[in-house]
Image (cartoon, rainbow, N blue to C red):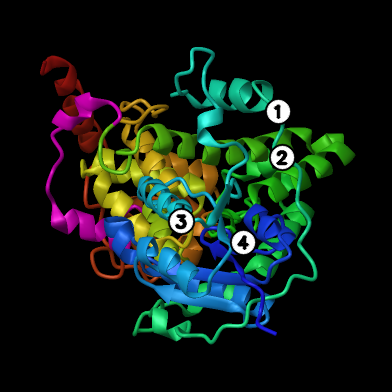
Amino acid sequence: MAESRPFIVWFRQDLRLDDNPALNAAAGSGAPLLAVYILDDESAGEWAMGAASRWWLHESLKALDEDLHGGLQLFRGKATEIIPSLTKRVNAIGVCWNRCYEPWRITQDKKIESELQANGHQVQTFNGALLFEPNTITKSDGTPYKVFTPFYRKGCLIGGPPPRELLDKPSNFQLFNMTKETTLADLGLLPRVNWYNEMAEIWSPGEKGAQRRLQRFLDTGIQNYKSGRNRPDQPFVSRLSPHLHFGEISPHQVWYAAKMLGAGDPSIADDVDHFLSELGWREFSNNLLYYWPELPRENIQSKFDRFPWRNDKEALTSWQQGRTGYPIVDAGMRELWRTGYMHNRVRMIVGSFLVKNLLLHWHHGEEWFWDTLVDADLANNSASWQWVAGCGADAAPYFRIFNPITQAKKFDPDGAYVRQYVPELADLPVESIHTPWCAPTDILRGAGVRLGNDYPTPIVDLKESRERALAAFKSLSSNN
């Protein structure tokens, strides 16, 4: 007897089996499932995944294929061509997928859905990536929020129903029998030069790794989250962002797990609330991208189109390589290069340093993070860089310029974070670790540090660069 017609499940940023609306819907049809992933760099254009994200995707797809007992079908090319063609070829009943919210994906999905429906195929799409879909969170007059606090408190917490309930992993579904035409190696996600050894040691991509990461955070991290999340030298952050971006765990799973923990222990209520608000920032960033699709390239505040950015390739390279002469900045940039991640407090410090002290365009930071972060996310990355540059919606005022020395002394008081990622300074005493250029000669000699040789002198003066940045900002208001 011929095999029944399949239902295609198109995996994208939902690389999991649990709490997966599209997978549940397809499994509920009773038809055999054809699980598909498409690497579509052409449609993504300049926002095709960067190197660190591609390493993560390779590992995540490997894990998902194992969870599907080898049943994940891989393709490379334009989804607008592959999905309709595959649907016809296997005579599929229809296609299920979870919606994504990058502008290029929205355009792509509309085209695919229209063609499939015109050919008589069922199309079912779901929200599997956000607590609330962007078009459901608006002000009373129907316009989108541009400030985070009312978006989160009024829009998310008060303005509507709670996030949907969790879905159980479907059981007893049958996979459609199809010969694999493309292997994981054929996708070419791994670089020719192996620079990702340390990432492989500290990360566990895939659904099981995501669940372990969440449980570890709930067991040991969330209890001091409110204050500890600002300390890069302490383990009080979840590090769930790459798992959330690739959909190895849903925000709903994270939300309800944290809420349940907080309900059982009132002493951590504030910590849980602050953690949930970080999920709210993820929602807010996606809202901004949805309503301002040019967010990755265009300033929300158009006056910044006239901003007098500098062009200094040498300074940019020093920033990228963690050779600015400011230890907390360099520690952050080296953590990023080695691990594919950077602590959020340090992201704000290095971002402020780039756009305000060096006066280099936020696009440079956005592009570098896009290539080097394992959690590179178009909405989060774009909104965050506009925030730190002061040109976004809910932006940090431009005159708020993070002083890397003050920030380092406050949030890395013992210098543990700097010592970990800038080992050439590891033997300096606490009073000198964040300002080695101020250390007496005998202290430097005793720590084996030769400024300008082992470690660079500061590439810019903080006071002078701050004044330069403020003058540049002031020129916007005077230049009508």
Secondary structure found at label 3: helix
Q: Label 4, on which residue? A: 248
Residue at horizontal 48 percent and vertical 82 percent from the top: 184
Secondary structure found at label 2: loop
Secondary structure found at label 4: loop
Q: Distance between the residues labelled 4 and 2?
A: 18 Å
Identify the disc placed on residue 187: none
Q: Which amino acid does label 3 sit on?
A: Leu
The earlier-in-sequence mark between 3 and 1 is: 3
Circle 4 Cα neighbour tier, 10 Å, few/some/many (<14 / 14–19 / ≥20)? many
Q: Label 2, on which residue? A: 164
Q: In this view, does 462 lie above or below 232?
A: above
Span highlighted in magenta in the image: 300-326
Instruction: From the top left corner, tell me how far across and down residue 126 is, in percent.
Output: 59, 47
Residue at horizontal 64 percent and vertical 21 percent from the top: 159
Residue at horizontal 14 percent and vertical 22 percent from the top: 475
| Left-right relation of 305 to 212 | left
Q: Is residue 231 above or below residue 449?
A: above
Q: Are marks 1 and 4 in contact (CB under 8 Å)?
A: no
The earlier-in-sequence mark between 1 and 4 is: 1
Q: Label 3, on which residue? A: 116
Q: Is residue 97 above or below residue 160?
A: below
Q: How far apart are marks 1 and 2 (CA)?
A: 8 Å
Instruction: From the top left corner, tell me how far across and down residue 259 is, in percent.
Output: 78, 40
Q: Label 1, on which residue? A: 161
